[in-house]
Amino acid sequence: MAFEQEWAELRDAAARRTAMQTNSAPAEGGGGAGGNDLVVNRDDLGAIGNDAYDLLGRLARDGDVARSSTFDAATALTNGNFVSGSAVLKVHDLWQTHLKTLLDACAQISNHLDYSKAQHAKDEVKIEGDLTRVSVLSEYLK
């Protein structure tokens, strides 16, 4: 079987499944078997966001201690005329770069989860309002 033919058959099958799912949506009560298609537990999002925020704080504090210690060691070695002082300073610089990257990633996770939590709450209010208007119109048209 040629690729184009197989691809066309797969597209047609997907289109038929989508059409069947759309046509078989329940008229009232919404959603699938559980009654809700979109379920987001805000408590879970909040807990993960808090964990990311806590990790960010601990990483910033402990990472700064490690950075400072490495810098002090590099300074002491350099002042003692040890060649390894410059190598330890390079370790310090790399640590600083990687620490900043990791802190940025933790902050993005925390901020995104906070944003997602707030956005889902707004979406829920909008969806409930839309469904209320539709049900009022349905009653009016009967």
Image (spheres, rainbow, N blue to C red):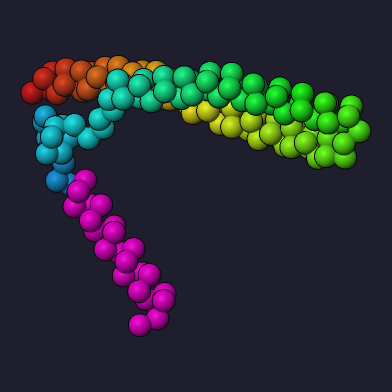
Measured as percent of width and height from the top left, residue 58 is found at: 52, 20
Give 27 or 70, whichever is nearer the viewer.
70
Looking at the image, which residue is at 38% across and 70% down? 7
In the image, residue 10 above or below residue 45: below
- Horizontally, residue 38 falls left or right of residue 35, namely right
Where, by quadrant of the figure, is residue 132 drawn?
Answer: top left
Name which residue lies at 55% across and 24% down. Answer: 59
Residue 6: percent from the left, percent from the top?
A: 35, 74
17 part of magenta stretch: yes
Q: Quadrant of residue 98?
A: top right
Residue at 8% x, 23% y: name it.
142
- In the visual, does 106 lie left or right of 73? left
Taking the view exactly as shown, the residue that stands out farthest to the left is 142
The reply, left or right, for residue 86 in relation to residue 40 is right
Whether residue 4 is situated above or below residue 58 in the rendered picture: below
Report the predominant secondary structure element of the magenta stretch.
helix
Report whether 105 appears left or right of 38. Answer: right
Residue 75 appears in view: yes
- The boundaries of the magenta stretch are 1-22
Query: Where is residue 36 shown, x and y percent of the image?
Result: 19, 31
- x, y percent for residue 15: 29, 57
Would residue 31 be counted in the magenta stretch? Answer: no
37 versus 48 height, above or below:
below
Q: Closest to the observer: 57 or 40?
A: 57
Can see residue 137? no
